[in-house]
Image (cartoon, rainbow, N blue to C red):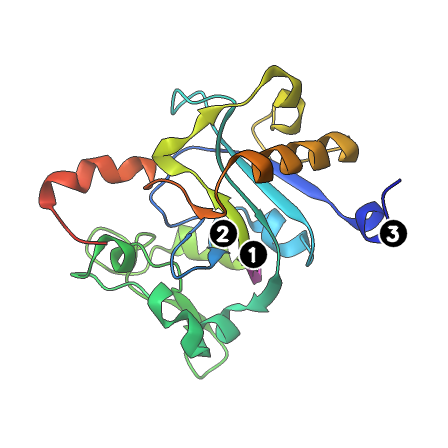
Amino acid sequence: MRNEAFQNMKFYAYKMRHDYGFAPNPFGNICTLATCKPKIRRNAEIGDWIFGTGSKMMGLKYHLIYLMQVSNKITFQQYWDDPIYEIKKPVKNGSLVRLHGDNIYHDNGQGTIVQCESLHSNDDGTPNNAHLKRDTKGKYVLISNNFYYFGEKNFLLPDNFLSVCSHVRDTIVVKDKELACEFIDWVKKNFKLGINGFPINWIEYRQLKMSI
């Protein structure tokens, strides 16, 4: 029988439309969800799990791309100010890791959250207000030091675990907690903690021979 912590735990699942190592960002030995999925970032609590699987659009329906357990939940400003997360700040001409940094929001000193140049900016580097509005609705950045990121090494889940995936356009909260825990235990038993593969969409950069 599971303990009280398990009873309070939630398991969020959603389908990813692309994977640039930006949302989530698995680098620096910490997996972060700082942009996109505002409902998850607003509602998830420490101890909850998030499952990201591929979408039909990617040709990866029911393929596991990552899972992470929330270790901490902080504000955008805390994320920006803490030197631990400096590696997560984007550098336009940096490595692929730095180019896709997700530490992009901070207070301008006048109480307004602003967006620095990043994957969520316009092509000319100016702020993309649509992304800014959506991202900041999430209010928080989710931090994980207990994660499995597969990226291009994604794989089709066994049939008995398909019901832990989102079957709708939006995020779901998995109702069968026992099955969700069995799924996590299976991943832990069969795969290496941390990064197992490069982001799926990095294939378009490979001929640039940029180091990570």
Of badges 2 and 3, the one in the foreground is: 3
Report the Cα–Cα distance between label 1 and label 3: 30 Å
Image height of 141 relative to 57, above or below: below
- Left of 164 or right of it: where is 137? left
From which residue to which does the magenta span run? Answer: 139-143
Q: Amino acid at mark 3?
A: Glu
- The residue to which callout 3 is attached is 4
What amino acid is at disc 2? Arg
Q: Quadrant of the N terminus?
A: top right
For residue 143, side relative to residue 179 (left or right): left
Residue 33 in view, yes or no: no
Q: Specify few, some or many for label 2: CA neighbours under 10 Å numbering under 14, 14-19, or 20 or more.
A: some
Q: Are marks 2 and 3 in contact (CB under 8 Å)?
A: no
Residue at the limit of the structure toward the top, as seen here:
159
Queried whether the magenta region covers residue 132, the answer comes back as no
Would you name the residue on which mark 1 appears? 137
Q: Position of residue 136 (x, y in %)?
A: 51, 59
Q: Of the residues shown, which amino acid type is indicated by label 1?
A: Lys
Query: Which label was assigned to residue 134?
Result: 2
Query: Disc 2 vs disc 1: Cβ atoms closer than 8 Å?
Result: yes
From what the image shows, is residue 190 above or below residue 111?
above
